[in-house]
Image: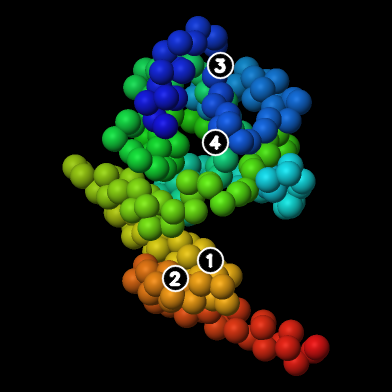
Amino acid sequence: MSAARNAGLAATASDYVTFLDADDRLLPEAIEMGERMLERHPEAVLAYGAYRYINLAGKTISGRNYVARLDDPYLQFLRIGNFIGMHATVIYRRDRLAAATGFNEAMRACEDYELFVRLAKTSQLVSHDEVIAEYRMHDANMSRNRPMMLAAALSVLDRQLTGDISRDVRLAVRDGTRFWRDYYARVLSEDAFQLFRTEPAKSVRMSLRALAMSPAATLEMITSKVRSKVRDHLRS
């Protein structure tokens, strides 16, 4: 994926560039809004906006998803992960992206997160809260490979611990490591719970992987799901 995006970047000659995965959608004013943001903020390397989820048929299944940029987006990326959330909401200055050598082709996943962290370390970002893209959810999403995604995200954090780093960076990486482990443990536990009736053996294996990621987050998620099922049963 990184190589394909870099090939696309090399083939462009425009001032701005954005990347749209085949199954996602941009809303009508997406690119224009991003261009206006970058024109207002010449110091920024990229602008991003909000998005929502759609299902396989294109029906909206969520409200707005948006996290505002804080004063230090580099530390923000380290602490709470990829807060931009959806790559299609991002528009880049093409020359600045090319100067940063584009996407890291060694990354199998989280290549956008790795790039955001790298850019935020030395450049400014801007954002707006308008919904400009739709993220299609289906069984073939690469993000459903939870162990691979976790390993990729943690590798991005590990790279920040080389050289002379500040205490703030070290603490942010510590917080971010906990964030990613908890996040993917909860998501994998949710996956396992959904499969328990139809594929119990697979459900157990997934639960064990989640426990290895974060025992506390896994037990919290499982307990919450069991309580919810018990409440529903008692109501019925």
Q: Earlier in the sequence, mark 2 or mark 1?
A: 1
Mark 3 vs 2: CB contact within 8 A: no
Q: CA distance from mark 2 to mark 1?
A: 10 Å
Q: Residue at x 69, y 48 (%)?
A: 55
Identify the mark nearer the N-term, 3 or 1: 3
Which of pointers 2 and 1 indicates the residue nearer the eye? 2
Q: Earlier in the sequence, mark 3 or mark 2?
A: 3
Left/right of residue 202 with respect to residue 36 in the rendered view: left
Q: In front here: 112 or 119?
A: 112
Q: Residue beneath label 2, please?
A: 202
The CA distance from mark 4 to mark 1 is 24 Å
Task: Please name the amino acid that badge 1 sits on.
Answer: Asp
Q: Which residue is mark 4?
A: 87
Of pointers 4 and 1, the one earlier in the residue sequence:
4
Residue 226 position by quadrant: bottom right
User: In the current view of this chain or complex, which residue is farthest to the left?
Assistant: 163
Residue 67 x/y as whole percent: 61, 47
220 vs 49, nearest the viewer = 220
The amino acid sitting under disc 3 is Tyr
Q: Which three-letter amino acid code belongs to the residue tagged 4?
A: His
Name the mark on residue 16. 3
Q: Residue furthest front?
A: 198
**Residue bearing mark 1:** 191
